[in-house]
Amino acid sequence: MSDSGSTHPGNARLYGLLGLMLLLWSANYIVGKVIIREVPGILASGLRLLFSTIGMMPIYIWSRGRGFSQPHPSRSLMKLALLGIVGVGLNQLTFLAGLGRTSVGHAALIIALTPALVLGIASLVGLERVTRWKVGGLCLAVAGVAILQLNPGKLEGATMLGDFLMFLCALSFAIFTVAGKRITARFDTVTVTTFAYVASGLTVSPIILAYYRDFPFASVSAATWISLIYMAWIPSLLGLSIYYYALRYIPASRVSLQSYAQPLVATLLAVVILGEPVTVGLLASGGLVLSGVFVAGRH
């Protein structure tokens, strides 16, 4: 996907791409659950980052040859790489590690906090104006997550540690979104995606793989390896490329609004494919979180 031209692609195309990204990222929860049945979440994260790096390098080389990706000062690329370690490396590490310790419903709902976190961080650094509506919306969303933790009918397999890791996942991506609004505007989509993944793959993956060097990789099924490659190449590379691309033309808080529908789509997929139940507490918490995010984003 190239954005070398300066012409606005049009809202229909942008929101169509964001819809595709929503579907890919929602299905990620289901694919992730399949993977962690055989591979520990942290190891799966390291492999995912490694496969993403391998998949992105040929695309970057091809785009440079076609003139789509332009050379940039090394200092700017270093900032982009550091941002990628936080926004991609930490995000993907906590996603699979958290998903192995909580339910799809809980995970998707906590990730839905991302727009609210984006607004909060953007307000702290002066990119968004603080209003009573935004503060109230943030408090409402946080209250929803609190109820999720205190709910006596909590889903089996959903732990506080898993939910906390999912919160770190959302927070790392929120930091990337706000910081990336300034930095990614200087680069084309392929360069942003490549340096984010390569920086993460070269720093995070070797440490994880060294720790799990005695893991019985030969026992992992072909279906799990295919799922890992799918997660590394389709939702990660294609989905994140769409996100970066849209971020160039749409405000960061609006791009992150796709998180409204992600809990619904992911939970429906989990109910149909994994047989996860939908509890009253989950619905109540979801209503508060999504209402809070909506109120904060509209005012």
Image (tube, rainbow, N blue to C red):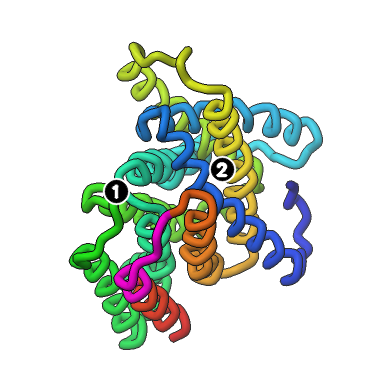
Q: How many C-alpha atoms fall within 10 Å of the one at disc 2: few (<14), some, or many (≥20)? A: many
Q: Residue 233 in the image: x percent, y percent?
A: 61, 37
SS under mark 1? loop
Q: Which residue is mark 1?
A: 157
Q: In this orientation, which residue lies closer to the viewer: 152 or 1?
A: 152
Q: Is residue 127 above or below residue 42?
A: below
Magenta includes 283? yes
Q: Camera-side residue: 257 or 59? A: 257
Q: Amino acid at mark 2?
A: Ser
Numbered disc 2: secondary structure: helix
- Apparent side of residue 288 relative to residue 48 in the rendered image (left or right): left
| Between 180 and 236, the one nearer to me in the picture | 236
Q: Residue furthest right?
A: 66
Q: Main secondary structure of the magenta part?
A: helix
Amino acid bearing label 1: Gly
Q: Is 58 inside the magenta-drawn segment?
A: no
Where is 211 relative to 240, above or below? above
Residue 45 seen in the current view: no
Q: In which image quadrant can residue 105 be found?
A: bottom left
Which of the labelled discs sits on residue 236, or is there none? 2
Q: How many callouts does the rendering have?
A: 2
- Marks 2 and 1 close (CB-CB < 8 Å): no
* Residue 185 visible to an observer of this rendering: yes
* In front: label 2 or label 1: 1
Q: Position of residue 203 (x, y in %)?
A: 40, 27
Q: Is residue 245 left or right of residue 196?
A: right
Q: Which residues are magenta?
A: 276-285
**Residue 15 x, y percent position in the rendering:** 68, 67
Residue at the spot 33% in from the left edge and 12% down from the top edge? 214
Mark found first going from the N terminus, 2 or 1: 1
Assign the C terminus to one quadrant of the image: bottom left
